[in-house]
Amino acid sequence: MSDSPPPTGDEGRVIELHLPSRLGYEKVAMDTASAMAKRMGFATDRVDSLRTAVSEAVTNAIEHGNQHDAAMKVVVIFTGSEEGLTIDVADQGRKRLDAAAIDRLPDIHQVIHSDNDDKGGWGIWLIKELMDEVQFSVAPTGGNQLRMVIHLDR
Amino acid sequence: MIDDELKVSTRQRDGVWIIDLEGDVTTFAEDAITSAYEEVTREGAKYIVMNSRQSDYINSAGIAILIGVVTEVNRQGQKLAISGLSAHFQKIFRMVGLAQYADIYASEDEAVSAMKQLAAQSQEESASA
């Protein structure tokens, strides 16, 4: 689902989810991520960071990429390796994620003192803050792809 | 499993209004949280504690709702404290910068006593003015 193949490793450590684009289903991905990370030996605070990052990525795919069209799927692939856990999240790209959204650096002071009622836009920033590696790309079919990696500290 | 609703309730303790949040704080929580805040504000709340009880899922949409409340608290000259968050969400709230606008306490007791202290200070100041 990306230009570069997922890390090779034990076939048993790859889990793939196909989720309908309906809010709430991000929790299935979040729980899968934490179950897998706990089995791999990640510390509790890292598992919590992963839960937040995965929920934000899948929510973004549901809301933005697939525009809440429940017939469109969000595909989440979890690949465990000796080094850590890689999670690929792909939507069907009804709406392309633009560079401005990816690079946005939200500022609480500006948000609080602005008349704009929309106080959101923290999701992608949080993912980048919480994960060790984050890459955004576009599939040949036009879908948004996000790959995030969390390293196992040994 | 998918549509866990947030339960929101309000109560008063030692002159401090408490908004209890129980469940997921996501986009679905907006109406419940906003109306609870409006309700305590109508009651004349000056010191408010947003108390999270077993909210193990707060996402960026939920954070945006809380930022909306903080915005209004600022405009109204109220004070807001947040309590009951897990260590993870305390960290997230600090990262986002919410801690600069609402003091974060581990427990409701700590939040309430801090708010009472603020209220007492403000009374002293207005008495000496």
Image (cartoon, grey):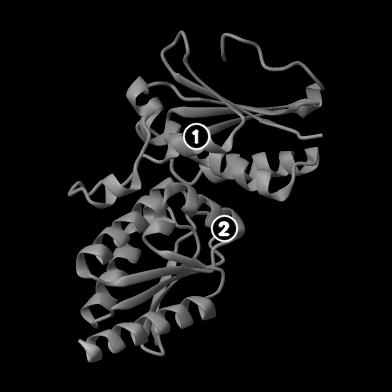
Q: Nearer the viewer, residue A69 or A14?
A: A14
Q: Nearer the viewer, residue A70 or B61?
A: B61
Q: Residue at x 28, y 47 (%)?
A: A111
Q: Is residue B5 left or right of residue A148?
A: left
Residue A133 visible, this angle: yes
Quadrant into which the N terminus of chain B falls: bottom right
Residue B72 to residue A68: above or below: below
Q: Residue at x 34, y 42 (%)?
A: A107
Quadrant into which the C terminus of chain B falls: bottom left
Position in image of residue B109 (x %, y %): 53, 81
Query: Mark 2 Cα within 10 Å, few/some/many (few <14, many 20+)?
Result: some
Position in image of residue A82 (x %, y %): 81, 26
Residue type indicated by callout 2: Asp
Which label number is shown at residue A57? 1
Q: Residue at x 41, y 71 (%)?
A: B8
For this orientation, the residue located farthest to the front is: B128
Quadrant housing residue A99: top left
Residue A98 visible, this angle: no
Q: Nearer the viewer, residue A17 or B31?
A: B31
Query: Mark 1 Cα within 10 Å, few/some/many (few <14, many 20+)?
Result: many
Quadrant housing residue A23: top left
Q: Is residue B126 left or right of residue A37?
A: left
Q: Secondary structure at mark 2?
A: loop
Q: Nearer the viewer, residue B9 or B76?
A: B76
Q: Secondary structure at mark 1?
A: helix
Residue type indicated by callout 1: Ala
Q: Give the residue number, with chain letter if any, for mark 2.
A: B56
Quadrant housing residue A51: top right
Position in image of residue A48 (x %, y %): 63, 48
Q: CA distance from mark 1 to mark 2?
A: 18 Å
**Mark 1 belongs to which subunit?**
A
